[in-house]
Image (cartoon, helix red, strand yellow):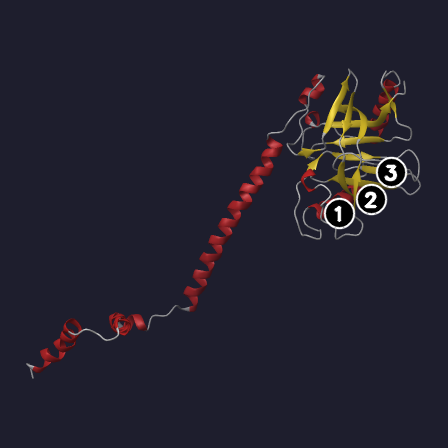
Amino acid sequence: MLLCKPSLLTLPQLRTSNSTPRNPKRSLSIITTNSITPTQRRRTMSAFEARISLVFALASQASSLSQRLLVDTATEVVKYVSPKRFESRTLEEALMAVPDLETVNFKVLSRGDLYEIREVEPYFVAETTMPGRTGFDFNGASQSFNVLAAYLFGKNTTNETMEMTTPVFTRKSQSDGEKMEMTTPVITKRLEDQDKWQMSFVMPSKYGANLPLPKDSSVTIREVPRKIIAVVAFSGFVTDEEVKQRESKLREALKNDAQFQIKEGGSVEIAQYNPPFTLPFQRRNEIALEVEKKEK
């Protein structure tokens, strides 16, 4: 009995080491299978372990997503934390700062003590009509801004998110039914007989005329032609009363301009470059009137 047990134990070892298997793959599978212990064969992942693994996988994915969002957020914040400045003529203008976002391209034709004359290049806008009795009605402006922002951030035919631009423009018309050109990202135009205003976002220039169409029928796209405007910059928060005063001063000053005159039927525009959390003395606002060259 003692002699038989060793022979039974060693016989498979002799076959494995001295004989050449006809099917190496089958032999390998046999060896691999034999090397697994009965305890390992019975080992399966429990429901609890599966849930733990899923939690870790989701946590890893969320962490990666959070890192990307953090980087994107930081990139956007830098545009506001490290703003850019326009050329200043006064101490008030020197303190103003604007976000480092795309704006409408323009060329300064002349610059005086009270205003500067700019030639604004053509651009495209997305616009919508909004309720409100003034150009700075908070509820009406917020509704229109949200409608246009939705288009800008994906509510369009390509579901594409587009970049924000500056400034925000508020515009009122001089007479009912008059067709006006507009400048930069957000413009508001008064419809005198309806207590309605129009707000416009300037589209990023990289799209040109190839802009995605809005899904909201209240949003329309159009091109704004080249124009010349007279501009005065000021700080603080904009009110209707201040707009009236500054518009009156700008119109009076333009009467003495040797080269340019106010374009007939032209309307006043107010540009606001900064987000709401900006300190009043750092905010840059501009009031503008469309002008044309005087006939010689």
- Measure how far apart labels 3 and 1 are at the Cα level: 18 Å
Q: Which mark is residue 110?
A: none
Q: Label 1, on which residue?
A: 147
Looking at the picture, does residue 148 appear above or below residue 278?
Answer: below
Residue drawn at x 10%, y 79% is 7
Q: Label 3, on which residue?
A: 190
Residue 65 x, y percent position in the rendering: 52, 49
Q: Is residue 67 left or right of residue 193?
A: left
Q: Earlier in the sequence, mark 3 or mark 2?
A: 2
Q: Label 2, on which residue?
A: 130
Q: Pick whichever, 208 or 100, lies toward us.
A: 208
Q: Pick whichever, 95 or 173, lies toward us.
A: 173
Label 3 neighbourhood size at 10 Å, few (<14), some (14-19), many (20+)? many
* Quarter of the rendering containing residue 230: top right
- Measure how far apart labels 3 and 2 are at the Cα level: 9 Å
Q: Which amino acid type corresponds to the residue marked 1 in the rendered image?
A: Val
Residue drawn at x 91%, y 37% is 178
- Measure how far apart labels 1 and 2 are at the Cα level: 10 Å
Q: Is residue 87 left or right of residue 34?
A: right
Tag 1 near tag 2, CB within 8 Å: yes
Residue drawn at x 17%, y 73% is 16
Q: Secondary structure at mark 3?
A: strand
